[in-house]
Each structure stands twice: as C-alpha cells, then as structure tokens.
Image: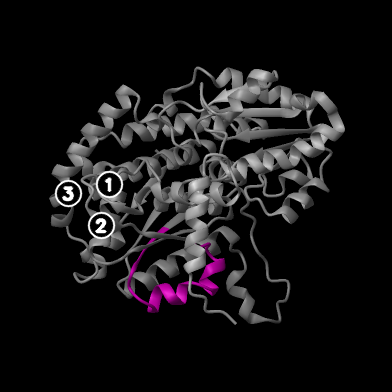
Amino acid sequence: MAIRFDYSNVMAENIGAEHGLSSANFEQLIPAGTEILKALRQKAENGSLGFYQLPNDTAGLADILNYAGVVKSRFENYVHIGIGGSALGPIALQTSLQDSYYNLSHKPKMFFPDNIDPDWLNDLLKQIDVSKTLFHVVSKSGSTAETAATMLYFMEFLKKKLGERFFQNLLFTTDPVKGLLNQIAREYPIQCFRIPSGVGGRFSVLSPVGLLSAAVAGIDIEGLLKGAREMAGICDHDDLMQNPAFLFAAIHTLYMQKGKNISVMMPYSNKLRDWADWYRQMWAESLGKKFDIDKNIIHVGQTPVKALGTTDQHSQVQLYVEGPNDKVISFLEVERFEQNGLLDNHFEYIDEFNYLKGKTLAELINAEKSATELALTNNQRPNLTFRFDRVDPYNVGAFTFLLQAATAFAGGLLKINAFDQPGVEEGKIATYALMGRKGYESKAEEIRNQLQKKTLFQI
C-alpha cells in the first residue's frame, strides 16, 4: 500500500504524558475494537453495511464506462446536481485526479453546483448552453429540497430549449426502486444508475454517485476501486495495532475523552484539499450525536476543521501551536508531485534568495509541513500524518475507504449509530414546513407559534 499512517506524534514518547497517548491506552480499546470488527464483517456480509461491498462491486463498471463514453461524445458540459454526500465526494475526485484548470482545455466541462444560491446558479447558466449539457441529478430519495429545487430551476431552461425532449439531457442516480426520481423515470425514458441499498450518501463516493462523474472526466475508476479493495483488506486486519482504520478511530476517541473535540485535516497539497471538505461531512454527520445506542444523552462528537498547507500556516497555525490544546491535527503529505523543476535565483544580487536555488517547490512544501509538524510536536500538540507516495486513483480510492472504515470504527467505540443523521432530518422537516410542502402543515403551525413567542434582540 502506497499510503502510510504515521501516528508517532500522538504518542507520549514524543509529546509528553500530559497530552500524549500510551500503548496501554490502545490496549484498553482492543477488546471493544475486536467486537466492532466482527460486527462490521457481519454487516458487510448481510448487506446492511453497503459501503464495505462497493470496492468489490465491479459488475456495473462496464455500464458506467460505456455511458461516460456516450456523454463525452454528445455533450459539451456536465452539471452534477446534488448536495452533501451526493456532491462532496464527486467534487473531491475531480479536483484531486484531474488538472486544476480542467475546464479550460477539456470537454465536457465539469460543474458541481452544490448549493442553491440563485446568483451562483445563474452565473453557471451564463457559461453553458443547456441544450448541450447533461444534468446528472443525484439523490437517493429524490425529495432532498436543495437537489429538487436545483433540478427544477434548470428544468425551466431545458424545457425552453428542448421542449418535450428535455429528458434526453437528464441522468438520474437514485434508489434502486423507491423515490421521486423513479416516478419521473417511469414517465420519461431517463437513464438511471442505482445507489445500492444500505449505502448512505456520505458513504457513496465509490458507487455511481462518484464513479459516473469521474468516468466522464476520464479518471481511472477501476484504479479507484482497486485501491479501495486493497485498503479494505488492510482495514480488516485482526491485529488492530496494524489496522489504520481502528488506529485513527481509537486516537480520536481517546482524545475526545481528553477534551480535544476539534479534528483538523490539513493537506499539504491542493489536489487533496477537497478531501478535507469531504472528511468534514463524514466525521461531523456520523459522529455528532445526542444519544448513544442505548438512548442515553451523551452529546458526543468532534468538530472537523479543514485547513490547507501552506496557505493556512499564515492564518491558522498560530492558533494550533499556541492557542487552546483542544485539537488533533491530521496532515496529508505527498512525497512525489508531478512537477518537480529546480528553482534558480534570477536576482543574484539578493543573497537571501540563494537558499532556494537548486531546490524544488515540492521540497519547499514538504519542508514547510515538517516545520509545522515540529512546531506542534514541540508544543505538545497531537498530530499525525497520512503520507501518499503520489496522488493517483489507487491511493485516493484507498484513502477514501480508510476514512469510511475509520468512521465505522469510531461509531462503535463511541457506542453510537454512525450511519444516521437525525439532526439533519430535523432541519429537513422544518424546511419542508416553511416552504409549504404538503403533509407538513402541523409542523408549519408549530414553527409559526414558536416564532411568535420568540424574544427579539436586534439593532
């Protein structure tokens, strides 16, 4: 495996006993971890933990690749309509595995409008001809307000351009049987790909949710699944001290007990920056829970924060090094960048530039990472590193599965359900009520009464 997990700087030997962990801390979690691993295996076998099966689900790859070929030949633009887990993973695949300025030189151009800001969506419309654009709507239920509204917004312009042929520019990825998108697809001959049952949105990136857009952009989706498949084997290791998913979960669980309730992910690579965004949803939505599995109120979870090296050395690292010691920092480091040309001093009369002569930007960015790591460690701030030998589909697939498995382990260690999101559902219901959706009238009345009783403080 070409990703290494270095957790040296969370150990007491390196950052001291007050803020460091000991081998005994991990040993105390081994029995629980062993039971969690058994439970995960059972759920994977019976299909109730769907994401565990995705790396091995290659049966539909040919259909995805064939359809992607059709898209590339027919359309000038691809617009991905989804939110949360239906968008963050596909965005991270695109930005990590394709040229940073892909749309300037490739077709179809790839767009991921994952918010309902009307001005933002209008700006996108100025850049595309909707008659030459595929709109890929991704929603398991089809009822997510933001996804439905975005689809309806673009439908206005599709119908004006194509009339009743609008369906030729639509693609749905949704539930195998249920949901509102299936109702539409039964009326119009719209191509549908399926999100396997038991696969939640934030765990769906290695399903057609992420693979379809990746294939359209020419990303090696077979390489993605191969990396995930090999990492799945590593994360199934019986020796939990050799299992990176357990170790990542255990480290963060132990630090929650020490009051370190902020988890920072800091890639030293622009290619990997959006995986920190993806991680934020995975960690926050999975682990931020009011109740444990026995319905005890616990209010558990870590607040995930994204940062970018070296950019945020000039905005965040001062806080991380000298502020409250309430964070665990995960670095993403790349050993081999694609571009590695040597720098020269073109202003030889400025001696201060000479230390950069003969060096590369790759050397500099990794030296900066090492310097930040050293500063944190010297100040007893826990930090760990995922070290990629390079950013490629194999490693990205492996990293994706590792963090998904780590989330499952963390849920087990915290004794919570890591696969639901009741807090999000509460907000969805309130949105439906405020927007006047049929069936939510009593909730709307409840909200109106609540707002009338609200004591205002404003200027």
Residue at mark 2 to residue at mark 1: CA–CA distance: 9 Å
In the picture of the structure, the residue carrying the numbered disc 1 is 416
Q: Amino acid at mark 1?
A: Ile
Q: Is residue 275 above or below residue 266?
A: above
Dot 3 crowding, Cα within 10 Å, few <14, some 14–19, many 20+: some
Sequence-first tag of 2 and 1: 2
Q: Amino acid at mark 3?
A: Leu
Identify the magenta region: 306-330
In the picture of the structure, the residue carrying the numbered disc 2 is 298
Residue 216 falls in which quadrant of the image?
A: top right
> Label 2's element?
strand
In magenta stretch: residue 390: no
Residue at mark 3 to residue at mark 2: CA–CA distance: 19 Å
In the picture of the structure, the residue carrying the numbered disc 3 is 29
Q: Is residue 233 above or below residue 439?
A: above
Q: Nearer the viewer, residue 231 or 4?
A: 231
Dot 2 crowding, Cα within 10 Å, few <14, some 14–19, many 20+: few
Sequence-first tag of 3 and 2: 3
Sequence-first tag of 1 and 3: 3
